[in-house]
Image (cartoon, rainbow, N blue to C red):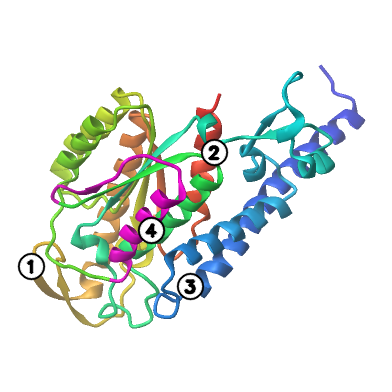
Amino acid sequence: MKIPLSLAVSIETEFFLAHFSFFIFHYSLFINTMTLFDSVDLKRHTNLELIAQKVVEGFIIGLHKSPFHGFSVEFAEHRLYQPGESIRNIDWKVYARSDKFFTKKYEEETNLRARIVIDISSSMYFPGKEVDKDVKMNKLQWSCLAAAALTHLLKKQRDAFGLTLFDEGLTFHSEVKSNSAHQQLIFSTLDKYVYNEQVNKKTAATESLHLIADAVHKRSLVIIFSDMLEHPDKMEPMFDALQHLKHNKHEVILFHVMDAAKELHFEFENRPYEFIDLESGEKLKLQSNELKKEYSAFMTKYEEELRMKAMQYKIDFVPADINQGFDQVLQSYLIKRSKMRV
């Protein structure tokens, strides 16, 4: 069947505009969040709540400036007005922009519970100043800032949230609430790990994830930040633990937190180094280029295996490079949230 030229041109134009809009959407988010990310100095900015607020504000500005309206933070706080309801709760500002009636959603109407889980074992303290004097933050600091921004956005969305921290066991496990006092508790807990450092803390991710699955009773969105640095032999048991969460009807997002340049691509200067295992303290001296090719190939294969396993168990796997901004975290939450509200 022949397609008229005018229709073909129209289809091609719409296809181009759709993809171009999608590109601009992600590019605008990237510019906004990266500008804020680059300005974060943990030595000067010690107010975690303020940093989280600025990150979220930058992210929302990126959403509102974008021509792509796949989802909206503002409208996630509202629901469509139903005839017969009181007009007291209608948001007239939203009506002025959209020509539709929306009422404000209140805390008791929330339909999502989020559990943020962070791996605080010693490997998450990489990289330190001894690796690179210009390093902005390590994996744990990045994860805590991402979690703080996510908490701020969750509260803005009227969603309930809780925090769990683990290394060799569960070191902190909060209730799930959405009020300001609870948010302050989360911020103060995260704050301890942004500005402190402890070495030789091993991880027991498999056991900890099973404990979390047993402890979280109501259906939740479980958001995990971890470098997933387990022995390859332990990968299967670890994903069995993640599957335990899925069996309990939870949705799971796994952020694989890495310093991609150093941990994935092994980009070190060509000189002798002493590498120290942050969890066991074991030391190894070698010339970086002696190992780079073999190491990079192994880590690339390992990450791909993680990705495939996650796909098999229907877990959202998100590579999270600490040298990038936090939009990858906030976007993943909003996309998953929109699916869970159906």
Q: Which residues are magenta?
A: 168-195
Height in image: 272 above or below 295?
below
Find numbered disc 4 in the image and state the secondary structure of the residue it sits on.
Answer: helix
- Lower position in the chain sequence, tag 4 or tag 1: 4
Find numbered disc 2 in the image and state the secondary structure of the residue it sits on.
Answer: helix
Q: Is residue 169 magenta?
A: yes
Q: Which mark is residue 187?
A: 4
Query: What residue do we see at 75% from left, 18% from top?
Result: 84
Q: Is residue 255 magenta?
A: no
Q: Which residue is mark 2?
A: 335
Find numbered disc 1 in the image and state the secondary structure of the residue it sits on.
Answer: loop
Tell me the crowding category of disc 4: few under 14, some 14 to 19, or many 20 or more residues within 10 angstroms, Cα based: many
Q: Which mark is residue 40?
A: 3
**232 sits to left or right of 25:** left
Tell me the crowding category of disc 3: few under 14, some 14 to 19, or many 20 or more residues within 10 angstroms, Cα based: some
Query: What residue do we see at 31% from left, 71% from top?
Result: 195
- Lower position in the chain sequence, tag 2 or tag 1: 1
